[in-house]
Image: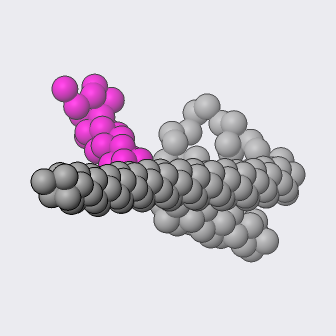
Amino acid sequence: MKNLFVKTIGSAMALFLIAGISFAQENATGSDLQNQDQNQVQEQTQTQEQNQVMEQNAVQEQTQTQEQNQVKEQTAVQEQNQESIRNRKRFRESLTDEQKAILENQEMTQNQKRNAFKASLSEEQKAMLRENQELRKQQRNQYRTNVSEEQNQQMRENQENTRTRTRTGGQGGN
């Protein structure tokens, strides 16, 4: 009986030992899975942070580019405005006393002034006017190509309001 008792205790101890090893392995495996999950979460977080940084950098670059383009456009517009001012000044300086008198005449109607002034222009003055007109067309076309849709819509509304006021003799369109 003692032998049976020793064998039973030995078997029980062997079972406890096997159960303990299995339990330890399961805990180690569970711990490994937890570590893997934590590593995956950390990797995902790092990836998301990297993506956010990249997006922020892209937005900053885009903003800088837009600002640089705006500065270039503003500079170009200022140069064009200066050119227009120089052309206007050059044209005014080319006016004769007779042409100035026509423009200042209070007895003539606007239409009569226009016709008399056009008739008095020299070929050089006509060329200046054509150049200035061409420059204004270029500026207008350049402006229209760089304008947003919202700004286009606003310009159309302003043109319609102007036409309506003109048709109603300055009374407005309401």
Magenta stretch contains residue 166 = yes
In this orientation, does residue 128 appear?
yes
Which color mode does the image show?
Answer: one colour
Which image quarter: residue 25?
A: bottom left
Viewer-nearest residue: 93 or 50:
50
Q: Residue drawn at (19%, 26%), measured in percent from left and top?
A: 174
For the record, the magenta segment spans 148-174
Q: Nearer the viewer, residue 92 or 110?
A: 92
- Residue situated in front as seen by the camera: 106 or 73: 73
Q: Establish if 172 lies above or below 126.
A: above
Residue in the image at 60% along x and 68% along y: 138
Tell me if residue 130 comes above or below residue 112 in the rendering: below
Q: Residue at x 20, y 58 (%)?
A: 3
> x%, y% of residue 161?
30, 38
In which quadrant of the rendered image does the N terminus lie? bottom left
Residue 62 lies, in percent from the top left, at 59, 57
Report whether 150 appears left or right of 47: left
Magenta region, main secondary structure: helix
Can see residue 96?
A: no
Residue 56, x across and y down, in percent: 57, 51
Asked where in the image residue 154 lies, by quadrant, the reply is top left
- Name the spot of residue 65 as percent of width and height, x first: 66, 58
For this view, does 34 lie left or right of residue 165?
A: right
Q: Nearer the viewer, residue 52 or 151?
A: 52
Q: Residue at x 58, y 52 (%)?
A: 53
Asked if residue 103 is among those painted magenta in the image, a careful observer would answer no
